[in-house]
Image: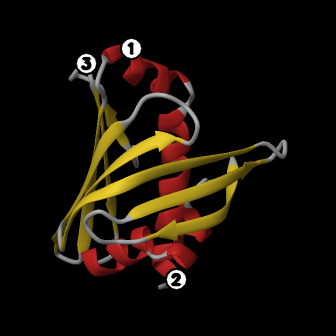
Amino acid sequence: MIELTVNTDVPTEIRMTRTFAAPRRLVVKAMTTPALIKKWLGGVRAEVVSAEIDLRVGGRYRYEFERKDGGRFAFVGVIREVAADRVVHTESLEGQPGESLVTTAWDEKDGQTTMTVVMAFPTQELRDMVIATGMAEGAGESYDELAKLLRSL
């Protein structure tokens, strides 16, 4: 069974879809609470050593990761929209050019929540650079960890 579906049919987008066996309120909580983000984001490739989020329109977030080899990097952005069923924010690798607009939507049905993440890039070249990093595999691993965490909440 394929857990995470990744679609790149739109030249400047990455669309990821995954269903979790948990209600939307728990999925949203796990994806927007710093202490919980640190438990699943990064999967097996990296540990989140710092997670800060000001979950309001205009608020900023920063997630700092440490890879197994000791290297560190951080994703940063600004929250553009917050609703019960979606959050929209910018995302960039701290200190690097290029930014994406990320829309994460959650649709609950029969106690299960389908998450759809759309990352929109200014160019196909930037989108392809992100894909080439192994981002989809890393996201899949992170969402596997999120599914485990949700079972414990």
Q: Amino acid at mark 2?
A: Ser
Which residue extends farthest bottom?
Answer: 153
* Left-right relation of 88 to 76: left
Q: Quadrant of residue 96?
A: top right
Work out how far the residue at label 3 is from the one at label 2, CA to CA, in angstroms.
38 Å
Which residue matches tag 2? 152
Q: Where does the image place residue 20, in percent across and percent down from the top left?
A: 35, 65
In the displayed orientation, state which residue is furthest to the top. Answer: 125
Percent across and percent down for residue 69 are 84, 42
Q: Is residue 95 above or below residue 109?
A: above
Q: Which residue is mark 1?
A: 125
Relative to 83, say whether 80 is above or below: above
Which circle, 2 or 1, is nearer the viewer? 1
Q: Alpha carbon of mark 3 to alpha carbon of mark 1: how far? A: 9 Å
Residue at 27 percent across and 23 percent down: it is 12
The quadrant in which residue 48 appears is: bottom right
Residues at circles 2 and 1 in contact by the CB criterion of under 8 Å: no
- The residue lying at 25 percent from left, 66 percent from top is 57
